Amino acid sequence: MIKAVLFDIDHTLLTEMPLIQLFLPQVYEKLSKKFGINKEEARDKFLGEILARRETYEWHDWNFFFRLFDLDLRYEDLLRRYPHKLHVYPDTVPTLEWLKEKGLKLGVVTSGPAYQRLKLELTGLEGYFDAVVTRDDVGAIKPEPKIFLRALEELGVSPREAVMVGDSLRQDIYGGKNVGMKTVWIARDGGEDFHFPDFKIRTLHELRKVLEVV
Protein backbone atom coordinates (compact mmCIF):
# COMPACT_ATOMS: atom_id res chain seq x y z
CA MET A 1 0.00 0.00 0.00
CA ILE A 2 1.37 3.38 -1.00
CA LYS A 3 1.71 5.76 1.94
CA ALA A 4 4.01 8.45 0.54
CA VAL A 5 4.89 10.26 -2.67
CA LEU A 6 8.33 11.82 -3.18
CA PHE A 7 8.99 14.56 -5.71
CA ASP A 8 11.89 16.15 -7.48
CA ILE A 9 11.63 19.97 -7.66
CA ASP A 10 12.97 21.46 -10.89
CA HIS A 11 11.02 20.59 -14.05
CA THR A 12 8.70 18.48 -11.91
CA LEU A 13 6.94 20.91 -9.56
CA LEU A 14 8.24 24.18 -10.98
CA THR A 15 10.67 25.71 -13.43
CA GLU A 16 13.38 28.28 -12.74
CA MET A 17 14.00 28.84 -16.45
CA PRO A 18 12.60 32.41 -16.50
CA LEU A 19 15.03 33.31 -13.71
CA ILE A 20 17.94 31.68 -15.54
CA GLN A 21 17.09 33.58 -18.70
CA LEU A 22 17.13 36.77 -16.64
CA PHE A 23 20.48 36.39 -14.88
CA LEU A 24 22.62 34.62 -17.49
CA PRO A 25 22.99 37.78 -19.61
CA GLN A 26 24.17 39.55 -16.44
CA VAL A 27 26.76 36.79 -15.97
CA TYR A 28 27.98 37.13 -19.55
CA GLU A 29 28.24 40.89 -19.17
CA LYS A 30 30.33 40.56 -16.01
CA LEU A 31 32.63 37.94 -17.56
CA SER A 32 33.03 39.99 -20.71
CA LYS A 33 34.36 42.92 -18.70
CA LYS A 34 36.39 40.73 -16.36
CA PHE A 35 38.30 38.86 -19.09
CA GLY A 36 38.18 41.48 -21.85
CA ILE A 37 36.28 39.19 -24.20
CA ASN A 38 33.00 39.55 -26.08
CA LYS A 39 29.73 38.28 -24.66
CA GLU A 40 29.58 35.27 -26.96
CA GLU A 41 33.02 34.16 -25.77
CA ALA A 42 31.94 34.82 -22.18
CA ARG A 43 28.86 32.67 -22.75
CA ASP A 44 30.94 29.81 -24.15
CA LYS A 45 33.37 30.07 -21.24
CA PHE A 46 30.66 29.94 -18.57
CA LEU A 47 28.48 27.27 -20.18
CA GLY A 48 31.57 25.24 -20.99
CA GLU A 49 32.35 24.90 -17.29
CA ILE A 50 28.76 23.88 -16.57
CA LEU A 51 28.69 21.23 -19.28
CA ALA A 52 32.07 19.86 -18.20
CA ARG A 53 30.64 19.14 -14.75
CA ARG A 54 27.29 17.72 -15.84
CA GLU A 55 25.72 15.36 -13.28
CA THR A 56 28.46 16.04 -10.70
CA TYR A 57 27.89 17.29 -7.16
CA GLU A 58 28.91 20.82 -8.13
CA TRP A 59 26.76 20.92 -11.27
CA HIS A 60 23.64 21.32 -9.17
CA ASP A 61 24.74 24.56 -7.51
CA TRP A 62 24.72 27.91 -9.30
CA ASN A 63 26.79 29.40 -6.50
CA PHE A 64 29.64 27.02 -7.30
CA PHE A 65 29.94 28.53 -10.78
CA PHE A 66 29.58 32.08 -9.49
CA ARG A 67 32.47 31.41 -7.09
CA LEU A 68 34.48 29.67 -9.80
CA PHE A 69 34.53 32.92 -11.79
CA ASP A 70 34.68 35.16 -8.72
CA LEU A 71 31.35 36.81 -9.55
CA ASP A 72 29.54 38.94 -7.00
CA LEU A 73 26.32 36.94 -7.30
CA ARG A 74 24.49 34.63 -4.91
CA TYR A 75 21.61 32.48 -6.11
CA GLU A 76 19.70 33.03 -2.88
CA ASP A 77 19.76 36.78 -3.54
CA LEU A 78 18.49 36.27 -7.08
CA LEU A 79 15.65 34.08 -5.80
CA ARG A 80 14.60 36.68 -3.25
CA ARG A 81 14.90 39.54 -5.75
CA TYR A 82 12.93 37.82 -8.51
CA PRO A 83 10.56 35.30 -6.86
CA HIS A 84 8.03 35.90 -9.65
CA LYS A 85 10.50 34.30 -12.05
CA LEU A 86 9.92 30.92 -10.39
CA HIS A 87 6.98 29.41 -12.24
CA VAL A 88 4.96 26.69 -10.52
CA TYR A 89 3.32 24.40 -13.05
CA PRO A 90 -0.49 24.71 -13.14
CA ASP A 91 -0.94 21.04 -12.22
CA THR A 92 1.30 21.18 -9.14
CA VAL A 93 -0.90 22.69 -6.42
CA PRO A 94 -4.11 20.81 -7.36
CA THR A 95 -2.16 17.54 -7.33
CA LEU A 96 -0.51 18.25 -3.98
CA GLU A 97 -3.88 19.25 -2.52
CA TRP A 98 -5.44 16.02 -3.75
CA LEU A 99 -2.62 13.89 -2.39
CA LYS A 100 -2.87 15.55 1.03
CA GLU A 101 -6.65 15.00 1.04
CA LYS A 102 -5.97 11.32 0.38
CA GLY A 103 -3.86 11.24 3.55
CA LEU A 104 -0.57 10.56 1.80
CA LYS A 105 2.73 11.82 3.17
CA LEU A 106 4.66 14.03 0.77
CA GLY A 107 8.39 14.55 0.45
CA VAL A 108 10.99 16.22 -1.72
CA VAL A 109 14.32 14.74 -2.77
CA THR A 110 16.58 17.20 -4.58
CA SER A 111 20.18 17.14 -5.72
CA GLY A 112 20.27 20.90 -5.32
CA PRO A 113 21.75 22.68 -2.30
CA ALA A 114 19.95 24.19 0.67
CA TYR A 115 18.50 27.06 -1.38
CA GLN A 116 16.05 24.56 -2.87
CA ARG A 117 14.06 25.02 0.34
CA LEU A 118 13.92 28.74 -0.43
CA LYS A 119 12.33 27.94 -3.79
CA LEU A 120 9.59 26.01 -2.03
CA GLU A 121 9.12 28.79 0.48
CA LEU A 122 8.94 31.58 -2.10
CA THR A 123 6.45 29.66 -4.25
CA GLY A 124 4.20 28.72 -1.34
CA LEU A 125 4.84 24.99 -1.77
CA GLU A 126 6.81 24.40 1.41
CA GLY A 127 3.79 23.66 3.59
CA TYR A 128 2.70 20.69 1.52
CA PHE A 129 5.75 18.60 2.36
CA ASP A 130 6.43 16.48 5.42
CA ALA A 131 10.10 16.04 4.52
CA VAL A 132 12.54 17.92 2.29
CA VAL A 133 15.99 16.46 1.71
CA THR A 134 18.66 18.36 -0.23
CA ARG A 135 22.17 17.29 -1.19
CA ASP A 136 23.52 19.38 1.70
CA ASP A 137 21.58 17.29 4.23
CA VAL A 138 23.37 14.08 3.28
CA GLY A 139 26.42 15.12 1.27
CA ALA A 140 25.10 13.21 -1.72
CA ILE A 141 23.08 13.71 -4.89
CA LYS A 142 20.63 11.51 -6.73
CA PRO A 143 20.83 8.71 -7.77
CA GLU A 144 22.87 7.83 -4.66
CA PRO A 145 20.70 5.71 -2.33
CA LYS A 146 21.26 7.64 0.89
CA ILE A 147 19.47 10.79 -0.25
CA PHE A 148 16.32 8.73 -0.94
CA LEU A 149 16.71 6.67 2.21
CA ARG A 150 16.95 9.81 4.35
CA ALA A 151 13.64 11.07 2.95
CA LEU A 152 11.96 7.71 3.49
CA GLU A 153 13.27 7.62 7.04
CA GLU A 154 11.94 11.10 7.77
CA LEU A 155 8.55 10.13 6.36
CA GLY A 156 8.52 6.88 8.33
CA VAL A 157 7.81 4.64 5.34
CA SER A 158 9.57 1.79 3.59
CA PRO A 159 10.64 1.99 -0.07
CA ARG A 160 7.82 -0.30 -1.18
CA GLU A 161 5.33 2.09 0.45
CA ALA A 162 6.54 5.07 -1.59
CA VAL A 163 6.49 6.41 -5.14
CA MET A 164 9.20 8.64 -6.62
CA VAL A 165 8.14 11.26 -9.17
CA GLY A 166 10.71 13.15 -11.25
CA ASP A 167 11.83 14.25 -14.69
CA SER A 168 15.29 12.65 -14.78
CA LEU A 169 15.58 9.01 -15.84
CA ARG A 170 19.06 8.80 -14.33
CA GLN A 171 18.57 10.66 -11.08
CA ASP A 172 14.93 10.14 -10.17
CA ILE A 173 13.92 6.91 -11.90
CA TYR A 174 17.12 4.90 -11.60
CA GLY A 175 17.69 6.27 -8.10
CA GLY A 176 14.17 5.50 -6.95
CA LYS A 177 14.09 2.01 -8.43
CA ASN A 178 17.49 1.23 -6.98
CA VAL A 179 16.18 1.60 -3.41
CA GLY A 180 12.95 -0.29 -4.14
CA MET A 181 10.40 2.44 -4.86
CA LYS A 182 7.87 2.54 -7.65
CA THR A 183 8.82 5.29 -10.09
CA VAL A 184 6.91 7.80 -12.17
CA TRP A 185 8.69 9.69 -14.94
CA ILE A 186 7.12 13.04 -15.70
CA ALA A 187 7.99 13.96 -19.27
CA ARG A 188 6.27 17.28 -19.80
CA ASP A 189 7.83 17.64 -23.25
CA GLY A 190 7.64 13.97 -24.18
CA GLY A 191 10.66 11.75 -24.79
CA GLU A 192 11.70 8.10 -24.88
CA ASP A 193 11.54 6.30 -21.54
CA PHE A 194 13.23 3.09 -22.75
CA HIS A 195 10.62 1.16 -20.70
CA PHE A 196 12.60 2.08 -17.61
CA PRO A 197 10.12 3.84 -15.26
CA ASP A 198 7.14 1.99 -13.87
CA PHE A 199 4.90 4.75 -15.19
CA LYS A 200 5.25 7.66 -17.61
CA ILE A 201 3.07 10.77 -17.35
CA ARG A 202 2.89 14.11 -19.14
CA THR A 203 1.19 16.05 -16.31
CA LEU A 204 0.93 15.62 -12.55
CA HIS A 205 -2.83 15.25 -12.91
CA GLU A 206 -2.13 11.74 -14.23
CA LEU A 207 -0.78 10.72 -10.83
CA ARG A 208 -4.36 10.04 -9.77
CA LYS A 209 -4.64 7.17 -12.27
CA VAL A 210 -1.20 5.88 -11.32
CA LEU A 211 -2.02 5.69 -7.64
CA GLU A 212 -5.16 3.70 -8.40
CA VAL A 213 -3.10 0.81 -9.73
CA VAL A 214 0.14 0.76 -7.70
Image: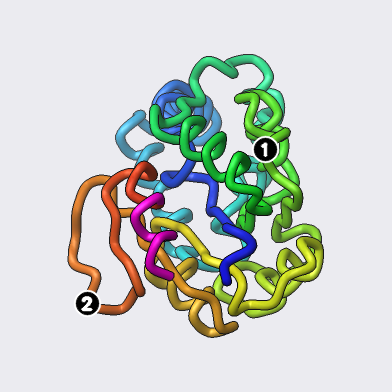
Q: How is the image coloured?
A: rainbow
Q: Where residue 194 is drawn, which disc sits there?
A: 2
| Mark-to-mark CA distance, 2 and 1 | 32 Å
Which residue does the image show at 55% across and 39% down from the upper left?
96
Instruction: Give the secondary structure at mark 2.
Output: loop
- Crowding at mark 2 (Cα within 10 Å: few <14, some 14-19, many 20+): few
Which residue does the image show at 46% across and 54% down from the upper left?
50
Which residue does the image show at 47% across and 74% down from the upper left?
182
Depth check: give the residue in front, 2 or 148: 2
Give the number of the mark in front: 2 or 1.
Answer: 1
Q: Where residue 196 is drawn, which disc sits there?
A: none
In the rendered image, the vertical position of residue 52 relative to residue 88, given as above or below: below
In the rendered image, the vertical position of residue 37 relative to residue 114, given as above or below: above
Q: Where residue 128 is drawn, which disc sits there?
A: 1
- Mark closer to the chain start, 2 or 1: 1
The answer to whether residue 152 is magenta is no
**Residue 152's x, y, as percent?**
72, 68
Horizontally, residue 174 falls left or right of residue 202, namely right
Which residue does the image show at 45% across and 77% down from the upper left?
174
Q: Which residues are magenta?
A: 208-214
**Residue 40's x, y, as percent?**
30, 34
Q: Quick one: quadrant of the C terminus?
A: bottom left
Main SS of residues in magenta: helix
- Crowding at mark 1 (Cα within 10 Å: few <14, some 14-19, many 20+): some
**Residue 78's x, y, as percent?**
63, 23
Amino acid identity at mark 1: Tyr
Amino acid identity at mark 2: Phe
From where the camera sits, is residue 85 visible? yes
The answer to whether residue 211 is magenta is yes
Horizontally, residue 170 falls left or right of residue 30, namely left
